[in-house]
Each structure stands twice: as structure tokens, then as C-alpha cells.
Amino acid sequence: MIHAILVPADEERPLYKVAIEGLTGLQAAVGGLIEVMDIDRPDATLILNEEGKVMGLPMNRRATLLLWVHLTRWRGHDALAGDVLIVGRPDDEGNMQDVPRELVELLFKTKVYKYEVTTVSDLDVWNGNQRRYEDWVTAYNDGLALASRWFAVNDVRIVPA
């Protein structure tokens, strides 16, 4: 059994923690065959319905925000459909792991957020401003909006303020 975060496509429903047992549990959570996408910072995996778009499942804006921030190369290229699970990256033997504690802390326990960016001129330094957010979705949106307006932005991250 692994511990995961379920990101419902319906934005009226909150994110919640779930315990998942095996492949059938993963498939039940996303409503069909699974597709996996590894993300960075922290190392985690998004699990979604492989046929979500073909089935006409609704866009999952919150999971798409997570994808675009935590896997920069997908920024602006695709959107995720249907409910999405977040789990840890597989171990050396290919076994799924629990969702990283860092994401649990960020999405469930953080009260105030900020975004930081690196620029193409200095990839190793994270820069931010004084802006603070009370919800993670707005922080993700604003960080990505800055990245779309300012082409010097290389990476975006959301952190506790």
C-alpha cells in the first residue's frame, strides 16, 4: 500500500490523501488505464487516466499547474484530464513509493506561499519578491504567469513563505 495525493479535476473538491493498493487501486482512482509522468523538484510521479482526453474527461487545472511547475519542459504544452494521483518515484526495483513529504507539507500544511524563479543568466540562484499567497493554486498561477511574460525565467518553484 502506498500513500498518495488525489487531485480531483473538479475544483470544487479539495485535494486529499489516499491509501492505494496495487495496480487495480491506481486504476480505480483515475478511472481507467494509467499513464505515469515523472516530475522533478521533488522527485514524484503523476498518475493519470491514459485515455482521459479521448474519454472527454474534464481538464484538471490544478494537476496541470503542478506539472508545468515541477516539469518545466511541459510548461504550456499540454493539459491533464481527469483525476490525477501524486505518488513518489519508483524505487530501484520499480515499486511505487509514498508521495514525497515535501509535497504533502506544501499542499496540506503550508499557510502562506511564495514563488521563486531562476533565470537563464543564473540557473543556480532562486529569486523571489515580497508577494505572498494564501493558497497554492494562486501562487502557482502567478509564478507561471511571470514565466510566460518574462522569457528570462528558466524554472519556477512554489515554497512556503
Image (spheres, grey):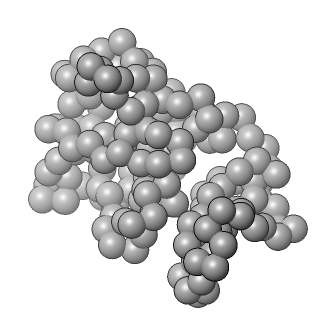
Residue drawn at (54%, 82%) of the image: 148
Up the image or down, 128 lies above or below 44; here it is below
Q: Position of residue 36 (x, y in %)?
A: 26, 42
Q: Position of residue 141 (x, y in %)?
A: 59, 68
The reply to whether residue 61 is visible in this rendering is no
Quarter occupied by the N terminus: top left
Residue drawn at (39%, 66%) of the image: 73
Q: Nearer the viewer, residue 51 or 128?
A: 128
Q: Position of residue 41 (x, y in %)?
A: 54, 47
Up the image or down, 118 lies above or below 37; here it is below
Q: Nearer the viewer, residue 51 or 76?
A: 76
Q: Quadrant of residue 132?
A: bottom right
Up the image or down, 143 lies above or below 57; here it is below
* Residue furthest to the top: 1
Q: Nearer the viewer, residue 118 or 77?
A: 118
Residue drawn at (42%, 69%) of the image: 75
The reply to whether residue 127 is visible in this rendering is yes
The answer to whether residue 39 is left or right of residue 136 is left
Q: Position of residue 128 (x, y in %)?
A: 78, 67
Total of numbered circles in the picture? Answer: 0
Q: Quadrant of residue 104?
A: top right
Residue drawn at (32%, 58%) of the image: 80
Up the image or down, 56 lies above or below 32; here it is below
